[in-house]
Amino acid sequence: MQKLNLDFDSRDLDKQSLSEAELDRLIGDRDYKFFLNTRNELYRQQDMKNKPPSRPQAIKLLAKNPNLIRRPLLVRETEILFGFDEETYNQLKKSK
């Protein structure tokens, strides 16, 4: 994002994790499963693909295990983008 010269605020979730309340607000009406990092060891160990946690359980797990959150996570007003997609980020830059 820096390379694309996008103006953004960042937060290192390993140093300043999201609280359960913040995660609940961030997820809102979205499917909470999109926030789960499928490459995370805990995700695989608990077979979350086949046995996903409930929303409240997922929020607790995400708050306690920030690496379980799919990243990068870009929040722009009411829109949330997961992962890095240079083309999408370029579109954001154009729509500034």
Image (cartoon, grey):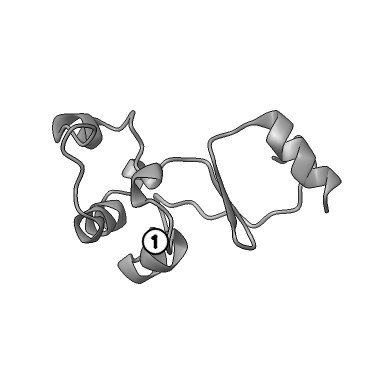
**The one of 91 and 64 positioned closer to us in this rendering:** 91
- Residue visible at 43% across and 55% down? 30
Name the element at disc 1: loop
Q: Which residue is disc 1 drawn over? A: 18
Q: How many residues crowd around disc 1 within 10 Å: few (fewer than 14), some, or many (20 or more)?
A: many
Residue 96 x, y percent position in the rendering: 83, 53
Q: Quadrant of residue 68?
A: top left
Residue 4 seen in render: no
Relative to 49, 12 lies left or right: right
**The one of 60 and 78 positioned closer to us in this rendering:** 78
The mark total stands at: 1
Residue 36 x, y percent position in the rendering: 34, 42
- Residue visible at 15% across and 31% down? 45
Residue 92 x, y percent position in the rendering: 75, 45
Q: Which amino acid type is marked by label 1?
A: Leu
Relative to 70, 91 lies left or right: right
Q: Quadrant of residue 38?
A: top left
Residue 26 seen in render: yes
Residue 1 x, y percent position in the rendering: 69, 40
- Residue visible at 19% across and 56% down? 57
**The one of 8 and 36 positioned closer to us in this rendering:** 36
